[in-house]
Image (cartoon, rainbow, N blue to C red):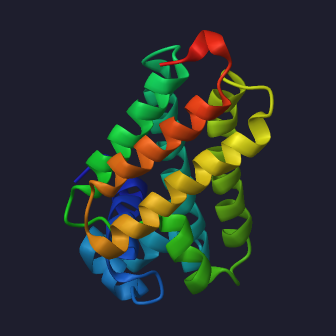
Amino acid sequence: MSASPRSDILRVAKMLFYGNGIRAVGIDRLVEAANVAKASLYRHFSSKDLLIIANLEQRHCRVVSDFSAATAESDNPFDQVTSIFRDLNSKASVPEFRGCAFALSVPECGDIDGVLELARRHKAFVRGGFGRIASAVCGDATSLALRMAILYEGAIATMAVERDPEIAVTARDCCLDIMERHTQPAFHR
């Protein structure tokens, strides 16, 4: 147990929602798994919808942090992409990996106020992260960033189905190849 019932509830919600599906997890199951009273859950989250949003917000913050850490390892855009896909490979190597929590949440909960907007904001962050990398290698960063983000997102979806984290390596190689084709001479690998 942590020092905070709120963090315990969020930790359990993250695990149960991701592992079982959001709609499949009821409040009673959350209360039991978090070992909190129902009143405590509702004191911290007045509805399951708010818990869903808080869970997705927390996931988004973690991805932002991971993405930032991966790109901070080097100023070289090729190294940054290598680091991002290395981290993705590592995340997909655990048996619990099911793909992108945001892509999973939209079909289940896209009707909940804020879920679709948060998922779109998350995907925009990913495109923006690749946009910053792409702008370091070419003049037309928008097109390159979109391609890189599609490779990243496609790798996540494919790894979830195939259960093969090495797909991240293939996606990385594709990403590096398209970067090489769009690169300014000073940044060739």
Q: Is residue 94 left or right of residue 154?
A: left
Q: Is residue 182 visible?
A: yes
Q: Nearer the viewer, residue 68 or 60?
A: 68
Quarter-wise, where is residue 188 in the image? top right
Relative vertical location of residue 179 with respect to residue 40 in this rendering, above or below = above
Q: In the figure, is residue 115 to the left or right of 141? A: left
Q: Residue at x 63, y 37 (%)?
A: 129
Whether 105 is drawn above or below 67: the answer is below
Query: Residue at image x 42%, y 42%?
Result: 173
Q: Nearer the viewer, residue 69 or 22?
A: 69
Residue 147 location (% of width, % of height) = 64, 50
Q: Position of residue 89 (x, y in %)?
A: 31, 48
Image spot of residue 105 (x, y percent): 54, 75
Q: On the rendered image, what quadrant is the N terminus found in?
A: bottom left
User: Foreground residue, 96 or 189?
Assistant: 189
Residue 173's place in the image compared with 114, above or below, is above
Residue at position x 53%, y 54% in the image: 151
In the rendered view, does 173 fall on the left or right side of 46? Answer: left
Question: Is residue 44 visible to us here?
Answer: no
